[in-house]
Image (cartoon, rainbow, N blue to C red):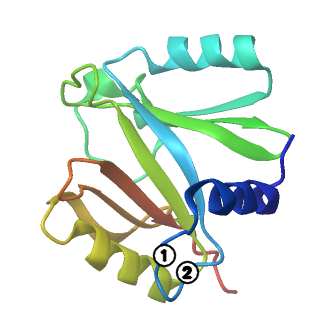
């Protein structure tokens, strides 16, 4: 398997140059995030059985401070399939209807407030914000479509400082 550095070098050789910003976030991880219409549990169990790994599921009913219709209590608010200590896919049931083709988002985990705020303001500019960047019970979070129609989910886990 080719390392990330070797891949970048091969791309430079292939395309001649790589165009990029003058700075880059050094601590982010991007993961696919799948959205389902009530069958997230079945889909994620299928992916676990096919790919291996460990599956973690959290339902809407298990979640503190969430005001949702009780009929959604057994649906999945968040799930993570991990393999070798890395999440390979995350997913949830969406309370609103999801159309095929619009059920994949890119999720980024950040390690600092400045980074997530900067990325949110830049990526969401000209797009449609569904959930503005805000402090939630699990950390900072935002969900939006950028101006090209790509769905993004930004997350910053803040650990309690005791």
Q: Quadrant of residue 6?
A: bottom right
Local crowd at mark 2 within 10 Å, few (<14), some, or many (≥20)? Answer: few
Q: Which residue is mark 1?
A: 20
Q: Quadrant of residue 16?
A: bottom right
Left or right: where does residue 27 sit relative to residue 108? Answer: right
Please determine whether, in this image, residue 101 is positioned above or below residue 20. above
Left or right: where does residue 46 sit relative to residue 130? Answer: right
Q: Which residue is mark 2?
A: 24
Residue 125 in sight from this viewpoint:
yes
Q: Image point 23% across, 25% down: which residue? A: 98
Quadrant (top left/top right/bottom left/bottom right) for the C terminus: bottom right
Q: Image point 30% across, 31% down: which residue? A: 94
The x and y percentages for residue 133 are 30, 71
Question: Which is in the foreground here, disc 2 or disc 1?
Answer: 1
Q: Say which element carries label 2.
A: loop
The x and y percentages for residue 155 are 48, 63
Q: Nearer the viewer, residue 96 or 4?
A: 4
**Would you say the residues marked 2 and 1 are in contact, meaning their CB atoms lie under 8 Å apart?**
yes
């Amino acid at each position: 398997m080719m390392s990330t550095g070797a891949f970048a070098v091969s791309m430079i050789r292939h395309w001649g140059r790589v165009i990029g910003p003058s700075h880059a976030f050094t601590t982010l991880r991007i993961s696919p995030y799948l959205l389902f219409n009530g069958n997230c549990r079945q889909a994620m169990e299928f992916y676990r059985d096919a790919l291996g790994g460990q599956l973690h599921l959290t339902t809407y009913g298990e979640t503190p401070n969430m005001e949702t219709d009780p009929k959604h209590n057994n649906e999945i608010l968040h799930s993570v399939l991990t393999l070798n200590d890395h999440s390979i896919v995350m997913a949830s049931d969406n309370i609103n209807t999801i159309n095929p083709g619009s059920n994949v988002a890119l999720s980024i985990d950040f390690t600092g407030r400045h980074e997530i705020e900067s990325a949110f303001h830049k990526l969401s500019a000209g797009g449609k914000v569904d959930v503005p960047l805000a402090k939630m019970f699990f950390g900072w979070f935002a969900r939006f479509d950028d101006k090209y129609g790509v769905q993004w989910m930004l997350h910053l886990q803040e650990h309690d400082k005791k």
